[in-house]
Amino acid sequence: MAQLTFLQAIVIGLLQGVTELFPVSSLGHSVLVPAWLGGSWEQLVEQQSMTESPYLAFVVGLHVATATALLVLFWRDWVGIVGGLVSSVRYRRIRTTYERLAWLIVIATIPAGILGLAFEHSLRTLLAKPTAAAFFLTVNGFILLAAELLRRRAPARRPVDPALVAAEHVHDPNDVAMTQQVSARDAGVIGVLQSAALLPGISRSGITMGGGLLRGLTHEEAIRFSFLLATPIIFAAGVYKIPDLFGPLGDGIRPQVIAGSIAAFAAAYVSARFLERWFRTRTLIPFAVYCLVAGGISLIHFG
């Protein structure tokens, strides 16, 4: 099998940082891009189908860098969320914005975490093939289109009270909107749907953002909600694989992991800032078109 080079590590790190947050599937691109490039790049994809794969450990290990970028970008929100979780447990209540938001994240993370632990490795090794990734990337395009079309039927928006934002010292009014529009039941459903990202080509951010839109969130609120929901599950997925990198699977690639992680952190930070601005005025439609075109062409090429 091909040895991971520094160039490959950096390119894949940049790819991971961008595609994990853009609604286009990082796992799908980690399969399709090397397959399109061919040669030693394509051999990396073949490693992903092995039961014990250094490349797979490397790719999932990059998740820590991506999640760290989100933590840095939204650190003020996470201070409030963690504080809200602690206070709600301590006083046995859920009354403030951050207490509600903390439990929405917990509820959405539990099903995704359980299903990820149960099926993540088997699905990655079974479906880490260009044809499967191309098929699910095409499906992802239809999911994004459906979210845009069906959001018109979403529940009416509840206006955010500026006095509430000031009284609770909420960092961003969008945090209040999330807790007003999304119920605990909604969070549970979104958590289950989030698990579809285990399939190469299905985007975690696309699924969660679509769920937010269908509950009446604006695009700006939905992408923020998506980032907050994604942070713990992405971080956990990376931490879960870190021990592999300190074992035999990490032999010969640890410096490359560091280089790739730096690239993934930078790409994720820039991507998150870009998407926040993008969704203030734009929709998921361009990403849906990209997935349909890229998935369709790849399906024809690799099919």
Image: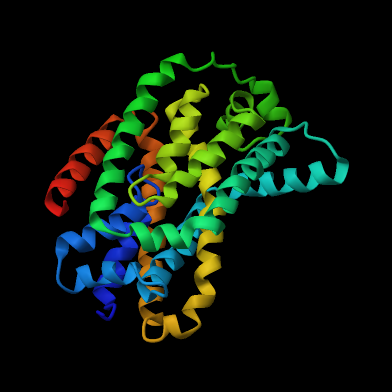
Q: Nearer the viewer, residue 170 or 253?
A: 253
How many discs mark residues in the rendered view? 0
Please give left or right for residue 282 compared with residue 241 in the image: left
Residue placed at 64% from the left, 38% from the top?
104
Outermost residue, left side: 301
Instruction: Write down the quadrant of residue 102 in the picture.
Output: top right
Which coloring applies here?
A: rainbow
Residue placed at 70% from the left, 49% from the top?
82
Q: Nearer the viewer, residue 218 or 115?
A: 115
Instruction: Write down the quadrant of residue 122 in the picture.
Output: bottom left
Instruction: Write down the quadrant of residue 96 in the picture.
Output: top right
Please give left or right for residue 109 compared with residue 87 in the image: left
Q: Quadrant of the N terminus?
A: bottom left
Residue placed at 39% from the left, 51% from the top?
20
Residue 73 at what x, y percent from top left?
50, 50
- Vertical position of residue 184 compared to residue 16: above or below: above
Residue 283 at what x, y percent from top left?
34, 28
Residue placed at 62% from the left, 42% from the top?
105
Residue 74 at what x, y percent from top left?
54, 48
Q: Nearer the viewer, residue 108 or 114?
A: 114
Outermost residue, right side: 91
Residue 230 visible here: yes
- Vertical position of residue 197 compared to residue 281: above or below: below
Residue 60 at what x, y percent from top left?
44, 64
Residue 282 visible here: no
Please give left or right for residue 152 compared with residue 33 in the image: right
